[in-house]
Image (cartoon, helix red, strand yellow):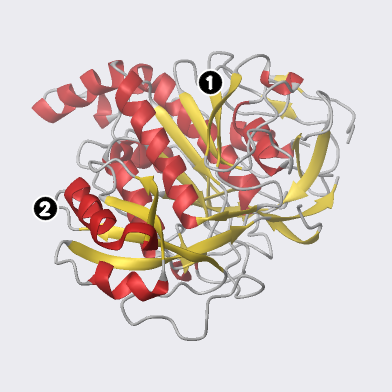
Amino acid sequence: MVSYSALATIAIILTRGVSAAPAEIPSDVQPIQGSVKQGSYIVKVLDTADKEVVINNLQRRLDELFTLVHDYDSEFFNAFSAIVDPSALSTVASNPNIEYISEDGILRASATQSNAPWGLQRISHPGPLPRNSNPNRLEYTYDYTPSAGRGVNVYVVDTGISVDHVNFAGRARFGYSAVESTEDGNGHGTHCAGTAVGSLYGVARSAHVIAVKVLDDDGTGSTSNIIAGINWVVSQYRENGVPAVMSMSFGGAVNVPLDQAVDAAVKMGVHAVVAAGNNARDASTTSPAHVPSAITVGATTIADVIAAFSNYGPLVDIYAPGQNVISSWIGSKLATRNISGTSMATPHVAGVVAALICEYPDLMSWVNGGNLGTDNDVLLRRQAQHGNLPPPQLRTLLLSTADHTKSGLLVPQLPAMPRTAVDISGATDGKTDSETQVAESTE
């Protein structure tokens, strides 16, 4: 269950506790800082090797000492997870086609309760809100395009979504669960989804939102289950071709398998928006926040400054409203809650990304100064018309349309014709150094 005694976000808090690994970690296994799923391992196969041959070989040799759990799509992440008896780990590691074996980390959610969406005004109007504005009131103006996000799928990889909540107006559905439950018994995923696409508290109000439940109702989940959720998102994108934005409000100690999975998803065309983390430190020590190809989001307050809890540093691409954010909650179709964290900032950006994807063909008049004379420019237009704007170009577009705070932070802005043209044709992977809503909170 979410703890309301800590600063919010779905933070991956990897601390060795009840489920801590044995003191002696086999030399064949990469350790994970923090709690682990006992006996469970993520096995990365060389990209040049046939994973199914490797699995079949291990099953034949190890029999009951080896139980396959997740077999990930080889084109996405050439790896699998399995329950392996400690006595058999050396046999697994001895296979020349295995790149590494990693412990299976446990991820954990936390949040603080307090009690508008002031964040929606901030992302739709340049400049800070008036001094002494109250973040706990639903009294702010949100200027937006009703069609924002149309034709885009936003996948909230989290604790699930209460899909019947009125805030989603029939645009939410269950997609995949890597755990036993399919419902959101926690609230965190529903809150994030409500900010990304909700009709009352959300950004992209014509996008569809899909629940990818990888965390249990107590807010914990294993790395292997999270990768399984990402694997499912990639498979859906490859199958239906609908532009995909993946909102992931979790983070923790550096985790190689998770980092590689997120990066692989981006390389396959999925837009990954991830939380910077709530440890008030440089995001370079946090996964997947430090993944160069992901869009990493820090949190700001209503005063346009970095929230005290937010991670920061050169790997944070953009900052968004993350303190005192009101959105959907569980318990009833009308429930809301006010919580804080980089978890809450992340879906603001996911919603803006969905809106940019939807509006991108209309923005080509100013991108590259309206000059479509090069082959690459023409290719970008064709990709955009098919909803396939590549993640590197989308990142450049997001940052170029952002508003600058007095302290130099970048805050996302909904699509609008900017003051200057920007060239996105040469973008590459990697980080670089009106409606008024008034409602009652009904928890």
| Res. 413 visible in picture | no
Above or below, comparing residue 294 to residue 306 in the picture: above
The answer to whether 387 appears left or right of 164 in the picture is left
- Residue type, numbered disc 2: Thr
Q: Nearer the viewer, mark 1 or mark 2?
A: 2
Q: Is residue 39 above or below residue 316?
A: below
- Which class describes the residues within 10 Å of circle 2: few (<14), some (14-19), or many (20+)? few
* Residue 207: mark: 1
Q: Residue at x 45, y 57 (%)?
A: 288
Question: Mark 1 falls on what kind of element?
Answer: loop
Position of the C terminus by quadrant: top right
Q: How many marks?
A: 2
Q: Is residue 371 positioned above or below 30 on the image? A: above
Q: Are marks 1 and 2 in contact (CB under 8 Å)?
A: no
For the point 37% across and 75% down, the residue is 87
Q: Is residue 40 left or right of residue 30?
A: right
Q: Position of residue 431 (x, y in %)?
A: 34, 55
Mark identifier at residue 63: none
Question: x, y percentage for residue 308?
Answer: 69, 65
Identify the mark at residue 48; answer none if there is no mark: 2
Q: Earlier in the sequence, mark 1 or mark 2?
A: 2
